[in-house]
Image: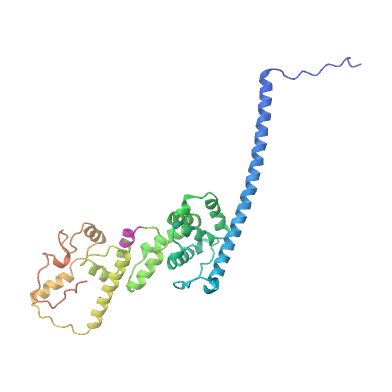
Amino acid sequence: LEAPWPPPAPPPPPTGSGASARRCRMEDLTAEVQALRAQLLQQTEENSSLQTQLLQLSEENANLRGQLQATPAGAMGLSAPRGKCPVGLPEKFDGTPEMLPSFLAQSRLYMELRPEDFPTEHVRVCFLTSLLKGRAARWATPYLLESSPLLNNYEAFIDEFKQAFEDPQRKEAANRKIRRLRQGLGSVLDYASAFRLCAQDLDWNEPAFIDQFLEGLSDPIQDELARVEVARSLPALINQCLRIEGRLNSRRGASPSGSPQPQSSSSPQAESESNQLITRPQLTPEERERRRRLNLCMYCGLAGHYVDNCPSKKPKSSGVGNSLAPL
């Protein structure tokens, strides 16, 4: 069979304004996508180049600082410094979570010892970023390139820095450890040192630290604190407890266990009242906190006076006896 001649013509392409418009729109979108891809590649290359330059500048800055410290002031025609900094530059931080606390502590110490070199928060933030390398330097790059407001707020920058590189398990472990911490038979100094070691990984406020410190103190120290007004800051409270411990130790040294106690000139009734004062029920932590919060007397629980001048305490017939020396 012979094929028909002429052969049939192919079907004509669809005509109409709708198909033509869709085809034109598709071509326009394809061109826009290609243009955006080209711009993205160009910006990525520029960003990579800027990051490389920033890292080089940070290293050069650290080297210049080292050379400046090693160069005598007279060789540069400068006046002698007011004092030599007792610590050197902190080691650079590469993003290792375990090294974060020591890095922040060393950086803060260095800046506190040279306050004339860090007059503004912006200078402090820039100094801290100059000590970063590796992953930590890459983290700080966007803040520097975008001139972030955090560059002018040191504490806010530190908060962001901690969120990025702090070990979350470290804070939870410190929280559990500080709540289990007790003075026991140890000294106040040992207890305070262990307490501060845990506290450095926590972001509690001052009242929370004070309450937790009071809860872990030994019973003799807590009994003495119940008789006086408790300090309102943690450093002052630690010093107050150290003074109390010193007085208790001196009394134990003056009256060692097993040795006869000095006779009091007070009457038998006064001695009985004094013994009642010593053996009165100990306040619970909740009741002690309530009385301290409401400024109530730690002896009778009423307002308007403290334990030293509490009217509920029966007067003794003699000043010699078991009364405590005032703080």
Residue at x 26%, y 61% (from the top left corner): 285
Residue 170 at x, y percent in the picture:
46, 60
| Quadrant assignment, res 242 | bottom left
Left or right of 272 on screen, residue 213: right
Farthest-out residue, right: 2
Please say if 208 is above or below 323. above
Q: From this viewpoint, is residue 256 visible?
A: no
Left or right of 231 on screen, residue 78: right
Please say if 34 is above or below 3. below
Give the total number of marks visible in the rendering.
Answer: 0
Task: Name the residue nearer the viewer: 50 or 303.
Answer: 50
Farthest-out residue, top: 5
The secondary structure that dominates the magenta segment is helix
Farthest-out residue, bottom: 259
Residue 318 at x, y percent in the picture:
9, 77
Task: Name the residue nearer the viewer: 21 or 111.
Answer: 111
Residue at x 86%, y 16% (from the top left corner): 7
Which quadrant holds the C terminus? bottom left
Residue at x 34%, y 67% (from the top left corner): 182
Task: Name the residue nearer the viewer: 95 or 317.
Answer: 95
The residue stretch that appears in magenta: 205-210
